[in-house]
Amino acid sequence: LGEPQIFGQMKIAFRTAQERGTLGTHLYRLFHHAFGVTKRIRTETAIGESATSAASAAVQLALQVFDGFEQQHALMIGAGEMIETAAGHLTSRNIAGLTIANRSLERGKRLAEKLQARAVGLASIGALLPTIDMVFSSTASPDLIVTAEQLATAVKKRKHRPMFVVDLAVPRDIEPAAAEISDVYLYTIDDLHRAVGDNLDARRVAANAAEKIIDTQAELYARGVDRMDAVPTIRALREQTRTTRDRVLAQARRQLASGKSPDMVLEWMANALTNKIMHAPSTALRKAGEESDSDMLEIARRMFSLNDDD
C-alpha cells in the first residue's frame, strides 16, 4: 500500500509502450490521468511518508543515521530480490558508491551492471568493511557472513565513524553480538517487520483520504471518456449540417444573381434550411410515434430542450 515502486513500474510500462507505438489514444489519456492522480495523492496525503517493505524501511532507518547518501558507500551482500530492491532505493537517493558481494561472482556482476555498481566475492568483505558506511545483507547461507570481530576492526579503522548494518537474512548473516559494538547500528529483519507493521497502520488511515481523491478523479475521467465517445457523432452532425448550409447558400446566391429580391431569397433560404435540417429527425420521430417508442421521443425532447407546453 502506497509503495512508489508500483508507480515506477507503471511509468516504465507507459514509456515502453510509447516507444514501441502500442499506446493508443485512450490508454495514453488514462495513464496521464492516473499519473496526475498519483502525484496529487502523494502531495495531499501521508500515504508515502512511511515504508511498508523491509527494504524501504531499512533505507528509511539509514536516513536516521546519515543526513543523506551522497557521500556514503554501501555494501550489498547477496544478489537476490531483497538486495536488488534495497539497492534500487539507495541509487534513487544518489548513493555515492555501491558494491555487490556475492558467493557467485557472475551473478553479482549481473546485478552490479544493472545498478552501475562493482562486484566482488564474499572473501573480499573483510578488507572492504573499513571503507563501507552501510551494509545490507540477505543471503541463504547457513553460516555467518560478517562477524562482530570484523565489524569491530572496521569501526576502529574508520576512527569510529558510524556504520549502519541491516541483516535481512533468516538465518542471520551478521553476528548478533555486533549490536553491542559502539558506532555500529545493527537492525534485523524482525526489527524491520515491526516498523513495517506500524507504518502499514498509518498508511491505512491515509488510504481513506486517498480513496476519496481516487473516487472523484475516476468519476471525472469516466465523464471525460463519455464526452470523447460523443465527439465523433457531434463531428459528423456538424459536418452534415455544414454541407447542407453550403448547398442552400450556393442556391441563394444564384437566385440573387438572377435578380430575385433579397427578401424573397432570405425567406426561401430560411425555409429550405429548416426543412432540410429537420427532415431526418422528423422522419425518425414519426417512426418512433408509430412504433410507440417513448424512449426515442423522450430523448428528442431532452435533446432539443422541449417543454411539455411546446
Image: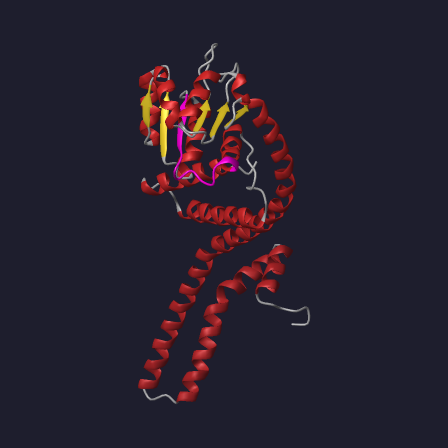
| Residue that sits furthest to the right in the current view | 309
Instruction: From the viewer's perspective, tell me whether residue 220 is left or right of residue 247.
Output: right
The quadrant of the image that shows the N terminus is: top right
| Residue that sits furthest to the top in the current view | 142
Q: Examine the structure image and report whether residue 68 is included in the region drawn in magenta.
A: yes
Query: Is 244 rendered above or below residue 140?
Result: below
What's the residue at 53%, 32% (across, down)?
57
- In the rendering, at what x and y percent does residue 220 appear? 55, 53
Instruction: From the viewer's perspective, tell me whether residue 222 is left or right of residue 146.
Output: right
- Count of marks placed on residues: 0
What's the residue at 52%, 62% (across, down)?
283
- In the rendering, at what x and y percent does residue 146 appear? 45, 17
- In the rendering, at what x and y percent does residue 153 appear? 43, 20
Q: Nearer the viewer, residue 26 or 175?
A: 175
Instruction: From the viewer's perspective, tell me whether residue 127 is left or right of residue 148.
Output: left
Q: Nearer the viewer, residue 278 or 92?
A: 92
Q: Examine the structure image and report whether residue 220 is included in the region drawn in magenta.
A: no
Query: Is 94 rendered above or below residue 308?
Result: above
Span highlighted in magenta in the image? 64-77
Query: Is 246 rendered above or below residue 79?
Result: below
Q: Is residue 293 visible?
A: no
Q: Is residue 202 visible?
A: yes
The quadrant of the image that shows the C terminus is: bottom right
Q: Nearer the viewer, residue 233 or 56?
A: 56
Quadrant of res 83: top left
Q: Nearer the viewer, residue 100 or 210?
A: 100
Query: Is 39 rendered above or below residue 69?
Result: below
What's the residue at 57%, 67% (across, down)?
304
Quadrant of res 189: top right
Quadrant of res 240: bottom left
- In the rendering, at what x and y percent does residue 196 appear? 59, 31
